[in-house]
């Protein structure tokens, strides 16, 4: 399917394929009774730093929690190197608190892994950490960084999750999000769109919980225009875009 046909098929952008066809309440109002218990899904959104899940998929996270699904916001690091003039320990304390505040807005549960911002690693122990976390959490869906990314921590995060997905027998649906496409995320061609028109303001509120990052200019220059652009692609005011990982049968 070419890109024009794909966008036409996306229609109004209620890209609920992220949940295997389970419908979402697009009203933007929280209602945990929206989903029957047997249909309730568990979604992990895994980012390299505090603020990555929110800026990349915050609107989708709000829609999912509004519909009664369980969402876990997983942070590979605590953003230890992210505040100029602060020690790693001081920055980690501040940014962990900001992430928890953001999760109160999105309705997600925060979960922190043990890597260090700016010094993330790919080795046997790190592969094992991510794999064991996924084994404990038992998600239905995981959304993480597209591995082709100019930011080391983003690329590491995507690679670790991809490896775990394969080693665990592809037992959950795997999707990738974008972060500042063109500057950080590269070669990203969406397969799925989610209309976040009704949750866009809450997404921004969650993003601004990361006060130490002074995100106003980044939001104005990158994330908000990208929401608008993805919305144009799928005929709504604002959207988030994702790539679903599907491997040819010969590789499975």
Image: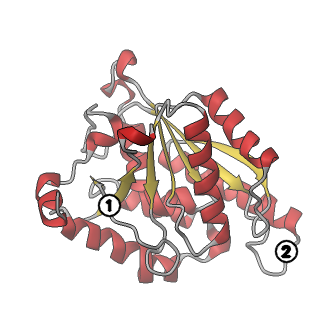
At x 36% / y 38%, what residue is drawn? 249
In the figure, 184 relative to 73: above or below? Answer: below
Pointer 2: what residue? 86
Helix, strand or loop at mark 1: loop
- The x, y position of residue 191, in whole percent, is 29, 55
Query: Dot 2, how many residues are within 10 Å of its Cα: few (below 14), some (14-19), or many (20+)?
Result: few
Helix, strand or loop at mark 2: loop
At x 37% / y 56%, what residue is drawn? 242
**Image quarter (top left, top right, bottom left or bottom right) of the N terminus:** bottom left
241 to the left or right of 133: left
Q: Nearer the N terminus, badge 1 or badge 2? A: 2
Furthest-front residue in view? 250
State which quadrant residue 50 falls in. bottom right
156 to the left or right of 219: right
- The x, y position of residue 84, in whole percent, is 78, 80
Nearer to me, 33 or 194: 194
Mark identifier at residue 190: 1
Residue 49 in sight in this render: no
- The x, y position of residue 43, in whole percent, is 48, 37
State which quadrant residue 237 falls in. bottom left
**Image quarter (top left, top right, bottom left or bottom right) of the C terminus:** top left
Tally of numbered tags: 2
In the figure, 215 relative to 133: above or below? Answer: below
State which quadrant residue 221 falls in. bottom left
Nearer to me, 32 or 184: 184
Distance CA(mark 1)–CA(mark 2)? 37 Å
Query: Dot 1, how many residues are within 10 Å of its Cα: few (below 14), some (14-19), or many (20+)?
Result: some
- The x, y position of residue 189, in whole percent, is 33, 65
Mark identifier at residue 2: none
Nearer to me, 90 or 179: 179
């Amino acid at each position: 399917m070419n890109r024009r046909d794909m966008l036409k098929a996306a229609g109004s952008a209620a890209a609920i394929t992220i949940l295997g066809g389970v419908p979402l309440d697009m009203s933007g109002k929280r209602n945990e009774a929206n989903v029957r218990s047997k249909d309730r899904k568990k979604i992990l959104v895994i980012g390299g730093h505090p603020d990555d899940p929110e800026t990349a998929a915050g609107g989708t996270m709000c829609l999912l929690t509004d519909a009664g699904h369980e969402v876990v916001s997983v942070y590979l690091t605590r953003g230890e190197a992210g505040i100029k003039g602060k020690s790693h320990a001081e920055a980690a304390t501040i940014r962990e608190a900001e992430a928890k505040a953001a999760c109160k807005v999105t309705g997600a549960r925060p979960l922190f892994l043990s890597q260090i911002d700016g010094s993330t690693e790919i080795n046997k122990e790190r592969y094992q950490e991510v794999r064991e976390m996924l084994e404990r959490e038992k998600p239905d869906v995981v959304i993480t960084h597209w591995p082709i990314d100019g930011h080391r921590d983003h690329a590491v995060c995507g690679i670790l999750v991809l490896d775990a997905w394969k080693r665990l027998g592809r037992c959950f649906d795997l999707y990738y999000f974008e972060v500042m496409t063109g500057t950080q995320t590269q070669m990203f061609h969406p397969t799925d769109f989610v209309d976040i028109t009704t949750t866009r303001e809450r997404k921004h509120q969650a993003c601004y919980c990361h006060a130490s990052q002074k995100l106003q200019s980044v939001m104005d220059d990158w994330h908000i225009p990208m929401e608008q652009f993805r919305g144009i692609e799928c005929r709504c005011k604002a959207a988030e875009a994702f790539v679903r990982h599907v491997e040819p049968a010969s590789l499975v």
